[in-house]
């Protein structure tokens, strides 16, 4: 396409090309949305002109995200409190009335949650679940793009679910809503892709910091769990890490302004026998590793069961809520809701061990029912609930074994809380920091560290995946380096197998062997016995070497010259991962595929294995440096020594002008390498006219790009 041709009517692009920096966004289908986008980019442009420093601008954006996500977390808590008052409560008295309220109210909340699922799916047309796994997936695969309307519905649903007695917590939704806030604000101000991901992480940190009143935990959680699950824990440079700190501080200060300064849990009493009790803390950690794994698996299995259940989408949350209500009516109302009162009793030592054992086991079940059926809420608080109950039981055992003077049940409850959380998420640092911030009790730090680390050690050997990764795996989402192995595990030998070539009888003479080796291009020719079973192979190169050195004589047969050492036998059901391992160990380029009687069915070539790996794994990964890959135009790639590769979207004020007229290189130092118009790659003609929406791939420093964005 010649850039000088008249401009045809431009169809609306299928991919939303965000403006790099602070340029005008491409036209949208809605006039209101277009005006809103222009307003955000105008504000971003003016801020950039005033600040004139990329890093200061990034910190300012992180502070805005932190305050907004903190306010969103505060609003969510206020809504949950209001929703709690909307639903009737069990006031005692008539047993039939108690059953009606304890069972009926959760079911009503489940029906309302089901209605919100229908709203998400049919009206907003967004995924039915927005939680931390969805945030991890969005960062890893979607460029961090999260819908704001979806987050609003999730917030409303969380209040309804918890307020009606659903067994879940608000902390997970607070994180997800914070991530959505970061994504929406990043798009509003037209930030680059790298900054977009930073703002999503900042929203996570700010949301959790505000929800728990724990800024350090917000930062560690985002690095260890969110970024750790999405991009392997590589937070890149300080341009990613600093926004997390700024947003966590801003979110906490906002939470203080809304709710006041407070400790989520008060410090517990301590005894004098901590060193003597380390064996019991080790036992607690080991049990927590198994229980935490069971906690996560229960939710995965229950979710799968509800997914397969033949019932309308809007009914499923009510079915789960019915189970929760029945258990609460039969056992205790303390199974309803997040369980803050039960946690407080466990920490002050007033929770009996029998009740703790019962509530801890049933809380696992009720949480699985609530979350698995589609209730809106997270698993943070329920995991702490189960851990506190487990710690209470172990404390009673320790006191019975060692007598008075041992650590209080509250200390064991705290360690149990951290250990279950760590085992469920496979993340030891977050609960250590979080519980210390929640109690500000340094005396518990040693058993807490020991418990969290050992619990993760046991959990990983019990089941290799954390709850979040297992959730993503159940949805068919494989992230990071795991994708490489998974692609090869999902493929089977039958997928790449070639038809069986000619084989040699064991009595074949030397001339027949020579002809067969030439036809096989000197690769492996397989030798079979009288029954047709593969018993060895002849490598053409080795055969030629032995003939030249005189090791073979005229009467040699196939059974005399064949090799058998290291010969692998593949079956059609074997995975491609196993085939690659067999090829590497044997050194063979052609592997036999046989049936149960070792009759040759076909062959698998090493080259085909490598080509499949290249296409399915390497081909789907982004190039380290690319000019027109599938990433959004705002993607920034560091080239070293301060030079970056970035895409610039042509704004209206540049449209109609040429590169020569703009003089980007002379005015700013930015050098254009490639010119994209839709899917077409145009020649970089300095005299051709630019069109609004063209994408220019260019290199330069951050300062030069900032100067280019201000170029008129």
Image: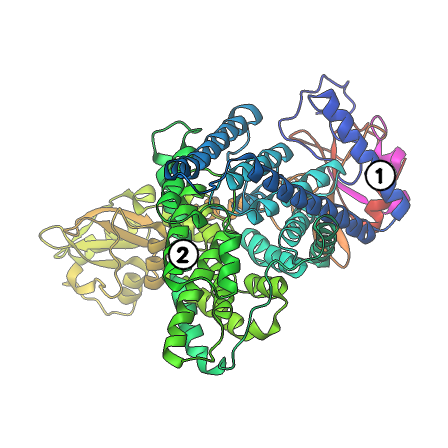
Residue at 12 percent of width and 57 percent of height: 507
Q: Point out residue 215 in the picture as x, y percentages from the top left corner.
A: 67, 58
Q: Which residues are magenta?
A: 654-674
Residue at 35 percent of width and 61 percent of height: 587
Residue at 64 percent of width and 42 percent of height: 78
Earlier-in-chain disc, 2 versus 1: 1
Q: Point out residue 250 in the picture as x, y percentages from the top left corner.
A: 74, 52
Asked whether residue 376 is in view, the answer is no
Query: Which residue matches tag 1?
Result: 45
Q: Point out residue 251 in the picture as x, y percentages from the top left corner.
A: 71, 51
Residue 294 lies left or right of residue 48; in this view the side is left
Q: Residues within 10 Å of mark 2 (few under 14, many from 20)?
A: many
Q: Residue 501, relative to residue 281: is it above or below? A: above
Which sits in the foreground, 55 or 67?
A: 67
Q: Are marks 2 and 1 in contact (CB under 8 Å)?
A: no
Residue 210 lies left or right of residue 448; in this view the side is right
Residue at 40 percent of width and 46 percent of height: 366
What count of labels does the image hold?
A: 2
What sort of colour scheme is used for the picture?
rainbow
> Residue furthest toward the left?
530
Q: Residue 444, relative to residue 297: is it above or below? A: below
- Badge 2 element: helix
Asked whether residue 638 is in view, the answer is yes
Report the disc number at residue 360: 2
Q: Point out residue 695 in the picture as x, y percentages from the top left corner.
A: 73, 34
Q: CA distance from mark 2 to mark 1?
A: 54 Å
Which sits in the foreground, 183 or 411?
A: 411
Residue 260 lies left or right of residue 439; in this view the side is right
- Badge 1 element: helix
């Amino acid at each position: 396409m010649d850039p000088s041709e008249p401009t045809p009517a431009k169809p609306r692009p299928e991919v939303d090309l965000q403006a790099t920096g602070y340029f005008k966004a491409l036209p949208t289908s809605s006039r209101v949305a277009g005006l809103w986008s222009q307003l955000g980019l105008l504000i971003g442009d003016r801020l950039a002109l005033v600040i004139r420093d990329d890093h200061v601008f990034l910190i300012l954006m992180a502070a805005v995200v932190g305050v907004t996500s903190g306010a969103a977390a505060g609003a969510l808590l206020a809504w949950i409190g209001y929703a709690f008052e909307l639903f009737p409560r069990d006031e005692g008295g008539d047993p039939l009335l108690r059953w009606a309220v304890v069972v009926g109210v959760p079911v009503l909340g489940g029906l309302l949650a089901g209605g919100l699922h229908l709203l998400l799916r049919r009206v907003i047309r967004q995924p039915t679940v927005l939680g931390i796994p969805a945030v991890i997936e969005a960062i890893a695969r979607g460029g961090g793009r999260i819908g704001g309307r979806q987050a609003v519905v999730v917030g409303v649903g969380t209040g309804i679910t918890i307020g009606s007695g659903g067994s879940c917590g608000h902390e997970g939704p607070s994180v997800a809503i914070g991530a959505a806030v970061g994504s929406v604000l990043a798009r509003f101000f037209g930030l680059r892709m790298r900054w977009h991901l930073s703002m999503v992480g900042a929203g996570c940190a700010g949301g959790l910091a505000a929800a728990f009143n724990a800024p350090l935990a917000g930062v560690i959680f985002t690095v260890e769990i969110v970024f750790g699950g999405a991009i392997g824990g590589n937070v890149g440079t300080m341009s990613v890490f600093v926004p997390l700190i700024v947003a966590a501080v801003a979110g906490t200060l906002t939470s203080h302004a809304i709710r006041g300064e407070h400790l989520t849990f008060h410090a517990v009493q301590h005894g004098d026998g901590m060193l003597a009790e380390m064996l019991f803390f080790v036992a607690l950690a080991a049990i927590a590793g198994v229980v935490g794994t069971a906690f996560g698996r229960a939710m995965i299995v229950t979710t799968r069961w509800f997914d397969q259940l033949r019932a309308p989408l809007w009914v499923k949350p009510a079915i789960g809520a019915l189970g929760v209500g029945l258990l609460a009516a039969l056992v205790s109302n303390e199974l309803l809701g997040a369980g803050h009162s039960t946690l407080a009793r466990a920490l002050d030592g007033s929770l009996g061990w029998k009740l703790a054992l019962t509530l801890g086991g049933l809380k696992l079940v009720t949480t699985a029912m609530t979350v698995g059926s589609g209730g809106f809420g997270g698993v943070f608080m329920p995991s702490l609930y189960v851990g506190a109950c487990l710690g209470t039981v172990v404390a009673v055992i320790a006191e019975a074994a060692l007598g008075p003077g041992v650590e209080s049940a509250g200390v064991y409850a705290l360690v149990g809380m951290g250990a279950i959380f760590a085992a469920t998420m496979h993340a030891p640092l977050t609960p250590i920091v979080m519980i210390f911030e929640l109690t500000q009790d340094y005396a518990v730090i040693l058993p807490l560290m020991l418990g969290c680390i050992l619990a993760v050690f046991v959990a990983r050997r019990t089941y290799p995946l954390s709850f979040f990764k297992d959730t993503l795996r159940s949805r068919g989402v494989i992230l990071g380096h795991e994708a490489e192995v998974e692609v090869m595990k999902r493929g089977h030998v039958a997928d790449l197998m070639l038809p069986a070539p000619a084989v040699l009888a064991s009595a074949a003479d030397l001339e027949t062997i020579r002809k067969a080796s030439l036809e096989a291009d000197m690769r492996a020719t397989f030798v079979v016995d009288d029954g047709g079973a593969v018993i060895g192979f002849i490598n053409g190169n080795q055969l030629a070497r032995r003939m030249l050195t005189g090791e073979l004589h005229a009467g040699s047969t196939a059974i005399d010259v064949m090799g058998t050492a290291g010969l692998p036998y593949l079956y059609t059901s074997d995975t491609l991962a196993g085939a690659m391992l067999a090829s590497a160990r044997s050194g063979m380029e052609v592997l036999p595929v046989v049936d149960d009687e070792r009759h040759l069915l076909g062959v698998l070539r090493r080259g085909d294995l490598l080509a499949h790996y290249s296409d399915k794994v390497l081909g789907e990964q982004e190039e380290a440096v690319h000019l027109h890959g599938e990433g959004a135009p705002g993607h920034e790639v560091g080239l070293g020594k301060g030079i970056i590769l970035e895409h610039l979207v042509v704004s209206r004020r540049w449209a109609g002008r040429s590169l020569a007229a703009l003089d980007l290189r002379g005015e700013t130092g930015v050098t254009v390498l490639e010119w994209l118009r839709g899917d077409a790659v145009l020649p970089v003609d300095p005299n051709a006219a630019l069109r609004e929406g063209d994408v220019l791939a260019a290199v330069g420093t951050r300062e030069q790009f900032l100067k280019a964005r201000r170029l008129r």
